[in-house]
Image (spheres, grey):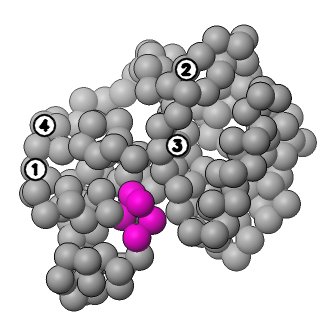
């Protein structure tokens, strides 16, 4: 989580592992301070787009702290609370054993998404708001909300950012 000045407020375990720093250390940095210098312009563009659209999600070629390349998925949501922004990233090829044991959740949740839910999710990943989603898909805003609620339940997440991140990792959508 970041504030309006792009200062780190919180960092989850994967972020702390990624940067090999404690939460206290990470809180001393602003967004971009830990990025390689050649990626700063990219981070500036992403921040500007986040503030303009309220949501960004895509896959990009990042750089590990040692300078080697890595594919990364990220999603960002502006103003989850006033002046508080969330950015979630996940290296596409991060070994799951580094994050600890992950319980088997049973059947793949993506198998139960309907084609319409995938369509709603793909548009949501582009930052399309509920009224615009409904207009584009000829659905009422309440129907869009119902689809999103069902998507969240099927993917085992609580919000749009989580759904988009999970769907990207599962290969359901491309951003």
**Marks 4 and 2 close (CB-CB < 8 Å):** no
Q: Name which of mark 1 and mark 2 comes first in the sequence.
A: 2
Q: CA distance from mark 1 to mark 2?
A: 30 Å
Q: Quick one: 24 or 7, which is closer to the camera?
A: 7
Task: Give the residue number, with chain letter if any, for mark 2.
Answer: 70
| Residue 107: assigned label | 4
Task: Give the residue number, with chain letter if any, for mark 3.
Answer: 74
Q: Name which of mark 4 and mark 2 comes first in the sequence.
A: 2
Residue 77, quarter of picture: bottom right
**Which residue shows up at 65% across the image and 51% down it?**
46
Badge 4: few (under 14), some or many (20 or more) residues near its Cα, within 10 Å? Answer: few
Residue 157: x %, y % from top left: 35, 54
Q: Name which of mark 3 and mark 1 comes first in the sequence.
A: 3
34 horizontally vs 166: left or right: right
Magenta stretch?
Answer: 124-128
**Which residue shows up at 35% across the image and 54% down it?**
163
Query: Disc 1 on helix, strand or loop?
Result: helix
């Amino acid at each position: 989580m970041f504030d309006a000045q792009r200062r780190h407020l919180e960092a989850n375990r994967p972020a702390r592992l990624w940067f090999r720093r404690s939460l206290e250390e990470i809180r001393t940095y602003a967004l971009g301070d830990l990025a390689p210098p050649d990626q700063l312009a990219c981070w500036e563009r992403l921040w500007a787009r986040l503030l303009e659209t309220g949501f960004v999600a895509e896959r990009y070629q990042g750089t590990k702290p040692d300078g080697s390349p890595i594919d990364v998925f990220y999603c960002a949501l502006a103003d989850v609370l006033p002046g508080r922004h969330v950015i979630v990233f996940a290296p596409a090829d991060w070994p799951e054993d580094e994050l600890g044991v992950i319980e088997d959740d049973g059947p793949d949740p993506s198998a139960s998404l309907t084609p319409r839910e995938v369509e709603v999710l793909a548009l949501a990943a582009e930052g399309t708001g509920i009224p615009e989603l409904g207009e584009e898909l000829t659905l009422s805003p309440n129907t869009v909300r119902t689809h999103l609620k069902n998507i969240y339940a099927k993917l085992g997440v609580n919000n749009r950012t989580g759904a988009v991140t999970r769907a990207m990792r599962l290969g359901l959508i491309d951003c």
